Amino acid sequence: VKKYRTVFNGILQDARKELINGKKLITENPFRDVEVPKEVDVFEDWDDEVEQDDYKVNPFTLEEIDELISKARGQLRNFIGIMSRTGMRPGELIACRWSDILFDEEIIKVRRTRIKKKNGPPKKKASVRDVEMLSGVKEFFLQQYELTGGDPKGEVFLNSSRKPYYSHDTITVQFKKLLKKRDERYLYQLRHSFATMMITRGEDILWVSRMLGHKSSDITLKTYAKAYELSKDKSKRQKRAEFLEKGHSLGTVNNLDYHKAPKIGENR
């Protein structure tokens, strides 16, 4: 709006000064009355600020996540548990307040993110969303409530001084210490892990996209193409198996006489 106002205001100001046959082209400049919108803090999504390596999907397995959770303690344990089961961005989770956690509805209201010591609404509209609490998420929040709960307007995760974290950098450092040597994966891979596990298990891609806060399912498909192809392969194999189990015109395996089957490799 500011840019368009500046351009058109300049054009109409010049036109207002121009004379044709002794008459002004226009007598008033309507853009003089257009109010310039106030500056609003809008922050980049963490997706826009991740390191290049974080874009490379290298997810943890379910067993690896369980191992990380068993190693972690306190807030770090809860952070890993929640992020790996919701796919939330680290900046979104670190900015969460207790008023955003609806225990009865089992919903997390994502309304802000924290980047470089500042809170603000996510840049993308799709990032403002309600995230479902899947199995285990509510329990991790309840455990966290024992540590930092009490103030509805307060943040869910607090530092050792019981103040809001400036960013998720501290959590990132603590997380790296849990990993085995030579494991270069980042905290952000927990988000990738959630998406990959959901897609490979056949979850609807639109649902996964909404959970992640992607602008469109195309972004989700592009990011997790490998997982999606694996999901389709699994689905096809399952359909083939069901087809064979039903028998159809092929007969059923159980009706075969195994004694009459040829012995492979036997000398004739």
Image: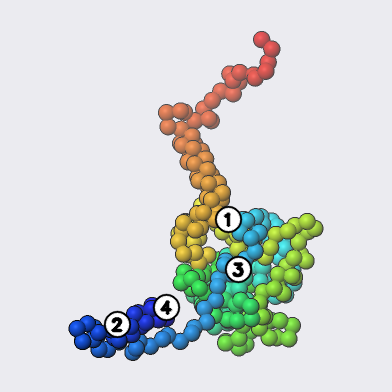
Q: Residue at x 52, y 78 (%)?
A: 42
Q: Which mark is residue 133?
A: none
Which marked residue is nearer to the observer: mark 3 or mark 4?
4
- Callout 2 crowding tier (Cα within 10 Å): few <14, some 14–19, many ≥20: some
For this orientation, the residue located farthest to the top is: 268
Q: What whole-number distance in Å separates the C-alpha atoms at marks 2 and 4?
A: 19 Å
x then y, percent, for residue 265? 67, 18
Q: CA distance from mark 3 to mark 2?
A: 44 Å
Decide which of tag 2 and tag 1 comes sooner along the chain.
2
Q: How many angstroms separate mark 2 from mark 1 (CA)? A: 59 Å
- Give the mark nearer the N terminus: 2 vs 4: 4
Q: In x, y percent, where is residue 246?
A: 46, 36
| Disc 3 to disc 2: CB gap under 8 Å | no
The residue at which mark 2 appears reads as 15
Secondary structure of residue under mark 4:
helix
Q: Nearer the viewer, residue 33 or 184?
A: 33
Q: Which residue is mark 3?
A: 49
Question: Residue flagged by tag 3: what amino acid is it?
Answer: Glu
Instruction: Say which label, 3 or 2, has the lower sequence index.
Output: 2
**Residue at image mark 1:** 196
Q: CA distance from mark 3 to mark 4?
A: 26 Å
The residue carrying pointer 1 sits among few (fewer than 14), some (14 to 19) or many (20 or more) residues within 10 Å by Cα, namely many
Q: How many marks?
A: 4
**Amino acid type for the residue under numbered disc 1:** Thr
Residue under label 4:
3
Using a 10 Å C-alpha cutoff, classify the residue at mark 4 as few (fewer than 14 neighbours), some (14 to 19) or many (20 or more).
few
- Distance from disc 3 to disc 1, alpha carbons, whole Å, reads 21 Å
Determine the secondary structure under disc 2: helix
Camera-side mark, 3 or 2: 2
* Mark 3 and mark 4 residues within 8 Å of each other at the beta carbon: no
